[in-house]
Image (cartoon, helix red, strand yellow):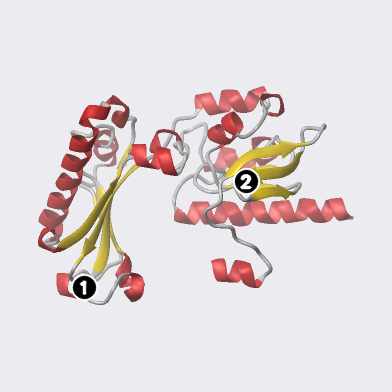
């Protein structure tokens, strides 16, 4: 996707943080301040959580009261916990043939949802082995496997700083043990490198509230259909639209990508209309 973007004239900046959105006297977007300089533009497609952008990157006077109320009414979605393992065996040697394996404890979705609210009860996880689709992801004779679990409530806020390392280590060990029990794949003897990312990690590095990388939870009053129908009022700040998991289609890879496609086309139409 990056290569295609560049081939069409796009420019990508890495290790660069957007810090402030700039507005003109009519409260319309006029640019973005970043750690690599200021970009002048009338249009922004922002892949960040709206609450964080409105609270930290926009002056209060440009944010309509409705958006403040909407942000307060919404519930954050899945909070991410990931164990990254660098293994000194290949996927083939370990017997892993699938890129992704979903490992819930049951087919009872209500139980899974409720168990995912607490550290004590949460046992769901998704395995990803990157080398299955990209053999060169790690050096020859090795592979990288991640185990991801999601939390449906902010239970990590109940962990003290003193207990943080012990708690995250214990939960990571539980995920590894459950993975080995459920699949039969043995990974513990082959771990060379291991990193643990908790919701606190996501909050710190990705700047998502409570570590909720999946945006806002879809509710009966706030699901994909109402969001799509309200696109005209969902983005009331002129020139600013939100894409990604916290946007109109909700979370998940497909939804995040399609939200970008939909809103990019809408923005292009607005740009052409203005030129005309």
Q: Is 73 rendered above or below residue 147?
A: above
Instruction: Report whether 228 appears left or right of 73.
Output: right
User: Residue at image x 25%, y 68%?
Assistant: 143
User: Residue at image x 67%, y 28%?
Assistant: 59
Instruction: Report whether 106 appears left or right of 219.
Output: left
User: Residue at image x 74%, y 39%?
Assistant: 238
Using a 10 Å C-alpha cutoff, classify the residue at mark 1 as few (fewer than 14 neighbours), some (14 to 19) or many (20 or more): many
According to the image, label 1 marks what residue?
A: 90
Task: State which quadrant residue 54 falls in.
Answer: top right
Q: Picture coordinates of residue 257 (x, y %)? A: 53, 56
Q: Is residue 6 something that shows in the picture? A: yes
Task: State which quadrant residue 69 falls in.
Answer: top right
According to the image, label 2 marks what residue?
A: 34
Badge 2 element: strand
Q: Picture coordinates of residue 45 (x, y %)? A: 64, 49
Tell me the CA gap for discs 2 and 1. 41 Å
Whether pointer 2 and pointer 1 mark residues with C-beta atoms closer than 8 Å, the reply is no
């Amino acid at each position: 996707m990056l290569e295609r973007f560049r081939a069409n004239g796009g420019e990508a900046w890495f290790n660069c943080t957007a810090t402030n959105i700039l507005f003109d006297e009519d409260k319309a977007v006029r640019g973005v301040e970043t750690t690599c300089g200021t970009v002048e533009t009338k249009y922004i497609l922002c892949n960040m959580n709206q609450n964080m952008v409105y609270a930290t990157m926009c002056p209060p006077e440009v944010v309509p009261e409705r958006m403040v109320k909407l942000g307060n009414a919404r519930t954050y979605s899945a909070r991410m916990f990931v164990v990254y393992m660098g293994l000194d065996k290949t996927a083939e040697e370990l017997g892993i043939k699938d890129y992704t394996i979903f490992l819930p404890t049951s087919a009872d979705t209500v139980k899974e949802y409720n168990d995912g609210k607490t550290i004590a009860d949460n046992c769901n996880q998704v395995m990803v082995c990157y080398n299955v689709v990209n053999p060169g992801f790690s050096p020859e004779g090795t592979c990288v496997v991640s185990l991801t679990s999601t939390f449906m409530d902010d239970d990590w806020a109940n962990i003290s700083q003193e207990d943080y390392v012990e708690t995250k280590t214990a939960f990571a060990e539980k995920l590894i043990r459950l993975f080995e029990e459920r699949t039969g794949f043995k990974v513990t003897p082959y771990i060379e490198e291991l990193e643990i990312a908790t919701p606190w990690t996501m909050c710190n590095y990705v700047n998502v509230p409570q570590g909720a990388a999946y945006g806002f939870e879809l509710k009966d009053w706030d699901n994909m259909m109402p969001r799509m129908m309200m696109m005209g009022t969902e983005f009331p700040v002129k020139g600013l639209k939100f894409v990604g998991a916290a946007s109109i289609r909700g979370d998940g890879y497909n939804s995040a990508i399609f939200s970008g496609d939909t809103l990019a086309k809408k923005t292009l139409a607005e740009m052409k209309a203005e030129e005309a």
